[in-house]
């Protein structure tokens, strides 16, 4: 992200994979915007060096603010929160609430079961093929960013 001069909008945590991404973006001299629901900053250990911190009341408000402030969605390997955010971005795109690109960083095949499920949902008529076709999935972060942002 720093090599491509991309700011970061995310949940605001200092720990884990996203904390490391935030540190890298900050080290590149770029903006890091954290969106944190009331009370969750104690659980997620809010990043102390955020360029901008946006406090919100609920997780729903958090996702709406992040969606509004971003140019694209990119899911890194993660757990339930990541899946919640990814599927909401996909659903909102399907419902034409946004038209922003969505990327999935599939490190070491982490998302292979999800990709198989998505392909099965399309094959069985539960999901539109256009929405699935609009998801950019790659194991290489640089290629993924280039594809999501139209540079590759």
Image: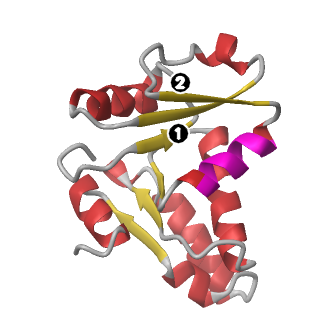
> In the displayed structure, does residue 34 sit left or right of residue 19?
right
Quadrant for the C terminus in the image: bottom left
* Label 2 packing within 10 angstroms: few (<14), some (14-19), many (20+): many
- Please tell me which residue is depicted at 47% across the width and 61% down the height of the picture: 71
Q: Could you say which is closer to the camera, residue 74 or residue 55?
A: 55
Q: Identify whether 25 is placed above or below 112.
A: above
Q: Is residue 130 magenta?
A: no
The residue that appears at 49% across and 18% down in the rendered structure is: 47
Residue matched to label 2: 13
Work out how far the residue at label 2 is from the one at label 1, CA to CA, in angstroms.
8 Å
Residue displayed at 44% across by 46% down: 76
Q: List the single residue furthest toward the left.
A: 3
Within 10 Å of disc 1 (Cα), the crowding (few <14, some 14-19, many 20+) is many
Front in this rendered view, residue 73 or 48: 48
Q: Please name the residue shown 67% across and 47% down the image.
A: 65
Residue 125 lies, in percent from the top left, at 73, 89
In this rendering, is residue 55 above or below 99?
Answer: above
Span highlighted in magenta in the image: 60-68
Query: Height in image: 138 above or below 108?
Result: below
Q: Which residue occupies the extreme front position in the image?
A: 52
Q: Are marks 2 and 1 in contact (CB under 8 Å)?
A: yes
**Residue 151 x, y percent position in the rendering:** 24, 73
Instruction: Give the overall secondary structure of the magenta segment.
Output: helix
Q: Position of residue 147 (x, y in %)?
A: 31, 71
């Amino acid at each position: 992200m720093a090599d491509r001069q991309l700011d970061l909008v995310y949940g605001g945590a200092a720990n884990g994979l996203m904390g490391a991404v935030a540190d890298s973006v900050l080290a590149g001299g770029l903006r890091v915007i954290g969106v944190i629901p009331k009370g969750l900053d104690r659980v997620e250990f809010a990043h102390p060096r955020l360029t901008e911190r946006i406090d919100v009341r609920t997780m729903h408000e958090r996702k709406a603010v992040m969606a509004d402030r971003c140019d694209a969605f990119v899911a890194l390997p993660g757990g339930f929160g990541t899946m919640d955010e990814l599927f909401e971005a996909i659903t909102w795109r399907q419902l034409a609430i946004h038209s922003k690109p969505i990327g999935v960083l599939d490190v070491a095949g982490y998302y292979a079961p999800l990709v198989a499920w998505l392909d099965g949902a399309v094959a069985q008529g539960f999901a539109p093929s256009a929405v699935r076709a609009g998801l950019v999935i790659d194991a290489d972060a640089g290629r993924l960013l280039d594809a999501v942002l139209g540079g590759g």
